[in-house]
Structure formats: C-alpha cells, structure tokens
C-alpha cells in the first residue's frame, strides 16, 4: 500500500476515533456520573482523556511504518 494512501486512511481513522470516543465518553459520563462529586468527574475525565491515546498510537504507528519492500 502506498505511504500516501496509508496516511490518508490513518488521518481519517484518527478523526473518526476522536469524534466517536468523545461522544461515547461524554454520553457515559452524562448517564452514569450525574450525581457524582467533582473529584469523580475529574478522575473520570482525566482517565478517559488519556485512554484514547492507546488506539491513536496504534493507528499512527501503522501510518508511518516502513513501506513494504518491493
């Protein structure tokens, strides 16, 4: 697969990941943490704010990986 195509696909996947992840994390917080205190909200959003980095790192690693030798 050409490197430019991998970067295009990876960029689209990263944007979709961020949008879907943010919507799901916020919807879960709204549904489950409505009555929780401020420290619970802080811990939840700190954790979920860092958790999306793991799949994003995998996508980026795939994007910039060395092209296969022909």
Image: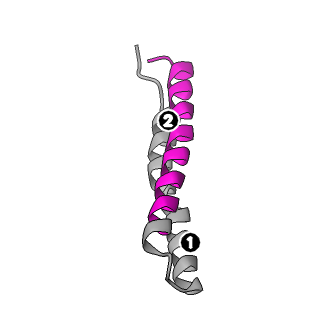
Q: Which residue is mark 2?
A: 13
Q: Residue at x 49, y 68 (%)?
A: 29
Q: Position of residue 8 (x, y in %)?
A: 56, 25
- Relative depth, front residue between 49 and 20: 20
Name the spot of residue 50 as percent of width and height, x first: 53, 64
What residue sits 59% from the left and 84% below the top?
Answer: 38
Which badge, 1 or 2, comes first in the chain's sequence?
2
Q: Which residue is mark 1?
A: 46
**Disc 1/disc 2 C-alpha distance (Å):** 23 Å
**Up-down: is 69 above or below 43?**
above
Q: Position of residue 18 (x, y in %)?
A: 55, 47
Of the numbered discs in the image, which one, if any, rests on residue 68? none
Q: Main secondary structure of the magenta part?
A: helix
Residue 61 within the magenta-colored segment of the rendering:
no
Q: Quadrant of residue 12?
A: top right
What are the residue bounds of the magenta stretch? 1-29
Q: Is residue 27 above or below residue 60?
A: below
- Residue extending furthest top? 70
């Amino acid at each position: 697969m050409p490197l430019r195509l991998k970067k295009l696909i990876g960029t689209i996947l990263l944007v979709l990941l961020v949008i879907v992840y943010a919507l799901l994390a916020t919807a879960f917080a709204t549904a489950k943490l409505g009555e929780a205190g401020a420290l619970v909200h802080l811990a939840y959003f700190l954790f979920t704010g860092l958790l999306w980095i793991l799949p994003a790192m995998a996508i980026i690693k795939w994007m910039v990986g060395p092209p296969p030798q022909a």
